[in-house]
Amino acid sequence: MKLACIQMTTARDPAESLPVIEVRVRAAVAAGATLVALPETCVFMEKGAAAMRSRLQVEAENPALDALCTLAADLQIWLLIGSMILANESDGDARSGKAVNRSLLVDPQGKVRARYDKIHMFDVTLADGERYHESAHYEAGAAAVLSSVCGARLGFTICYDVRFPALYRRLAEAGADLIFVPSAFTRPTGAAHWHVLLRARAIETGCFIIAPAQVGRHENGRETYGHSLIIDPWGRVLAEAGDEDRFIIAEIDLAEVARARGQIPSLTHGRRFALPNQDGRRFALPNQNGRRFALPNQDGRRFALSTQEGATQEGATQEGATQEEEGREGPNQQGWSHD
């Protein structure tokens, strides 16, 4: 299977971003790609929360999504829409409530086969007073997601999720061969952490890591790092995009997954242990081979693993163990996602 990552500088207006996506996807397919992955927030990156909300539409009524589904069907490819900022269907007033940051996998018939809402929200106030508060604008996802394409099991994550290795291990334990990490990393954090984090997630899980990225200076004033990566299960970089608007492509050999895990079978070696917490009580962590476990974190939330069909299976082995998660947004409380 040949897989491509599209690297781009998304505009504020979907009408400007969509033609760029189409040209680059068609070029990747001409180079032999059968699965093409787009970066996080690939359709628009607005300036400010109010402007972002003015563009919100629910998934079922989104013309940009319709255009991307048509493109996938026309080219007869699998298309991973790294993420779209969509209205939350559960809110009564779509434009006044929180948005969702959602990955969508589109099949060669143009149908959405899987969807994943980003779990981890970035909330922090820096020493200089700059504040990031994604949870004020986005509803966190509650389910980790797996899907299947051409005999490969795909796991879904988005950007800041990469800093939470438990999610990646759980996806790998449940059978993931590839894990997507569409992103819009800022230049400072990208230069410091991007390659290290992604290679670590590949090595820890024995998965291919597919990380299409935003790059360059955007109309909203933000600057993203680029360096889209395709990494094999041994942690080797198969393709890297640098800091240019372009696509990268690599051949994915699924036999490498079994080979890497056979040499380092750490997914089967998790052991139960106890750890005292701050008030002197103890909690136990079962081994991490797909059985249910809970780990208290800062905000105590949980997520469940769901299959391609979208049904959550809390407490089941392999397909449904639950875990804990944590939290993210954009500079000065503007309405975009980032690390």
Image: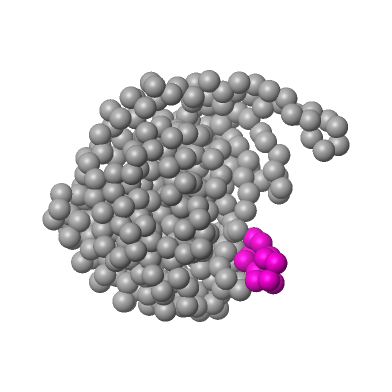
Is residue 209 or residue 144 the one in the foreground?
209
136 to the left or right of 210 = right
Q: Is residue 283 above or below residue 5?
A: above
Q: Residue 314 magenta-drawn? A: no
211 to the left or right of 275 = left
The quadrant holding residue 16 is bottom left
| Residue at horizontal 79 percent and vertical 35 percent from the top | 277
| Residue at horizontal 54 percent and vertical 77 percent from the top | 48
Q: Residue furthest left?
A: 30
| Residue at horizontal 49 percent and vertical 21 percent from the top | 268
Would you say residue 157 is visible in this rendering? yes
Is residue 229 or residue 157 the one in the foreground?
229
Q: Is residue 309 above or below residue 24?
A: above
Q: Is residue 257 above or below residue 200?
A: above
Residue 265 image offset from top left, x and y in percent = 45, 22
Residue 248 image offset from top left, x and y in percent = 26, 54
* Region rendered in magenta: 123-133
The quadrant holding residue 18 is bottom left
| Residue at horizontal 41 percent and vertical 54 percent from the top | 182
Q: Is residue 181 above or below residue 226?
A: above
Would you say residue 312 is visible in this rendering? no
Q: Residue furthest front?
A: 192
Quadrant containing the N terminus is top left
Residue 70 image offset from top left, x and y in percent = 24, 61
Residue 308 image offset from top left, x and y in percent = 40, 40
Is residue 143 or residue 6 the one in the foreground?
6
- Number of marks in the rendered image: 0
128 to the left or right of 68 = right
155 to the left or right of 89 = left
